[in-house]
């Protein structure tokens, strides 16, 4: 049975952030009253602190846990311990606080980084435990994987209704465009925009370009999360993706073209590619709660570039 979200008090952790803000938009589109929606911001509610977790879940019916400490390959290599600790503590404590409060449904926003490095493509949920994650993001991936174990254990022992969603690489307007810790798409957009503006003859990109990735427009991801909140109740993890992968080399060319950059692309092969391939099998999301991505990659990239240019 589908939950009528309009009658529920809903907490969205990270609701002022990139993905979280789109989740809030989707809840508003379903006419959830403003007074029934609550968001956490890291500056106000540090969810690594137990008392803050207890405070934010008080009086709520549903928790959508989208808050995370995230970044690209460089950031993961630089701060693996922080990424492990922060994400593990937030997820573990928040779910326990939610259980004690009697929350009716807890939605965990997980990550494709939880999958083993050499998972057969497309990644199926059944392969989630068949190996160790790719080394450059393993601490982050494992920390984000533990709420799945917790959710299944809590459902078994306490009858606690927690669901777990595995999301691919997200992109879109409102993303983090700081080169220190951004993901691949916003980082490439910044590099190409700056190179075009300053007539820089070449742009250097990490790796060989041989790795491939699947990307999901953030607004589509938010719709999938809200659909699962309404319609999905099971201990089985579910993939959320677009169902299409693209080699990084092709992605770089496409972003360069959309930005209008005419210079040379140089590949820094001393830098890692990360996981060789990433693409999810998205069959179950469509079957279980009717999710299908709507925004094609080129369209989404153009929207993201336009938003970035307008925000400068």
Image (tube, rainbow, N blue to C red):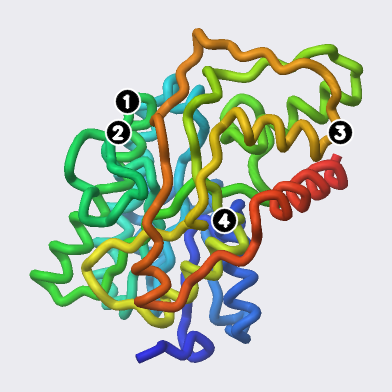
> At x 61% / y 48%, what residue is drawn?
171
Image coordinates of residue 256 in percent, x first then y, are 76, 31
Q: Nearer the viewer, residue 77 or 214?
A: 214
Please give the residue where the numbered disc 2 appears in the rendered image: 117
Is residue 245 depicted above or below 284 in this figure? above
The residue mark sitting in front, 2 or 4, is 2
Q: Earlier in the sequence, mark 4 or mark 1?
A: 4
Q: Earlier in the sequence, mark 2 or mark 4?
A: 4
Distance from Cα at disc 1 to Cα at disc 3: 35 Å
Distance from Cα at disc 4 to Cα at disc 1: 25 Å
Please give the residue where the numbered disc 3 appears in the rendered image: 260
Please give the residue where the numbered disc 4 appears in the rendered image: 19
The residue mark sitting in front, 4 or 1, is 1
Q: Residues within 10 Å of mark 2 (few under 14, many from 20)?
A: many
Q: Nearer the viewer, residue 250 or 109?
A: 250
Q: Earlier in the sequence, mark 1 or mark 3?
A: 1
Q: Earlier in the sequence, mark 2 or mark 1?
A: 2
Distance from Cα at disc 2 to Cα at disc 4: 25 Å
Label drawn at residue 135? 1
Label drawn at residue 103? none
> At x 73% / y 36%, what residue is drawn?
255
> At x 51% / y 69%, what residue is drawn?
292
Image coordinates of residue 36 in percent, x first then y, are 54, 81
Image coordinates of residue 85 in percent, x first then y, are 32, 36
In the picture provided, is 6 more to the left or to the right than 303? Answer: left
**Contact between labelled residues 3 and 4, with CB atoms less than 8 Å apart:** no
**Contact between labelled residues 1 and 2, with CB atoms less than 8 Å apart:** yes
């Amino acid at each position: 049975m589908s939950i009528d979200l309009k009658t529920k008090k809903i907490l969205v952790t990270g609701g002022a952030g990139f993905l979280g803000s789109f989740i809030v938009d989707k809840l508003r589109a379903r006419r959830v009253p403003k007074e029934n929606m609550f968001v956490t911001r890291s500056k106000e509610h540090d969810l690594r602190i137990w008392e803050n977790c207890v405070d934010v879940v008080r009086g709520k019916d549903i928790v959508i846990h989208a808050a995370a400490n995230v970044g690209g390959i460089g950031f993961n290599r630089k701060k693996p311990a922080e990424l492990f600790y922060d994400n593990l503590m937030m997820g573990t404590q928040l779910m326990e606080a939610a259980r004690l409060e009697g929350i009716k449904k807890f939605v965990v926003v997980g990550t494709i980084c939880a999958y083993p490095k050499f998972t057969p493509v497309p990644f199926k949920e059944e392969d989630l435990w068949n190996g160790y994650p790719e080394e450059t993001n393993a601490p982050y991936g494992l920390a984000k994987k533990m709420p799945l174990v917790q959710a299944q254990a809590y459902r078994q022992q306490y009858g606690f209704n927690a669901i777990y969603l595995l999301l691919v690489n997200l992109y879109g307007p409102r993303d983090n465009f700081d080169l220190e810790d951004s993901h691949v798409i916003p980082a490439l957009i910044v590099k190409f925009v700056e190179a075009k503006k300053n007539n820089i003859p070449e742009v250097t990109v990490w790796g060989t370009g041989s790795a491939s990735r699947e990307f999901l427009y953030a607004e589509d991801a938010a719709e999938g999360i809200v659909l699962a909140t309404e319609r999905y109740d099971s201990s089985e993890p579910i993939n959320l993706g677009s169902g299409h992968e693209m080699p990084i080399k092709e992605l770089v060319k496409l972003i360069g073209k959309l930005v209008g950059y005419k210079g040379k692309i140089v590949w820094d092969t001393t830098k890692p590619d990360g996981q060789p391939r990433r693409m999810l099998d998205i069959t179950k999301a469509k079957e279980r709660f009717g999710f299908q991505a709507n925004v094609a990659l080129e369209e989404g990239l153009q929207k993201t570039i336009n938003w970035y240019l307008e925000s400068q």
